[in-house]
Image (spheres, helix red, strand yellow):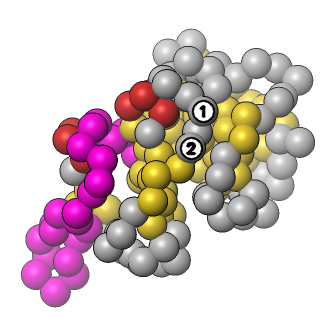
Amino acid sequence: GHIYAVGEQGLVLKLDPASGRFIALPMPYQGTLFGIHGDATVLLVHGLRGHALRSDDGGATWTEIATGLQVGLTASARTNDGAWLLASQAGHLLMSRDNGRSFQPLVTKTKPLPAAALVAAGAQGVVIAGPRGLQALALP
């Protein structure tokens, strides 16, 4: 697999296994990024003010994803059945069932907590970790 890192001013780095050094990837977004998630076919980055971008060519090109949010997207995960999840610092949870091309708000029985980390759990669950503790939610 590939190793990536994100940071301020749209910084996305990819580890070059041949040299052992990180290489900066070109990004159309110059704001803060909080996370990156994906695999060899699809990468998703997320950050401030609801920004999320998707790449299906290893990070060579990126497409902005409309999230409908203006708050920081602080966490991401992928479920066992292939759905993508994004969580915000304000307690929003978004889901994509089209391989990260579009996201919709997820309605759960319990309101999600503000997120710092997100982990898929089991076949239909997710665990949110944040400043208010841990929360396990069942996904629809």
Figure check: 113 above or below 9: above
Residue 128 appearing in the image: no
Residue 68 marker? 1
SS for callout 2: loop
Residue 92 figure quarter: top right
| Magenta segment includes 118 | no
Residue 54 marker? none
Residue 22 figure quarter: bottom left
Type of amino acid under label 1: Gly
Residue drawn at (36%, 69%) of the image = 61
Figure check: 125 above or below 16: above
Magenta-highlighted residues: 14-35
List x then y, in percent, for residue 12. Answer: 26, 56
Depth check: 20 or 103 in front? 103
Type of amino acid under label 2: Ala
Residue 66 marker? 2
Q: Quadrant of the C terminus?
A: top right
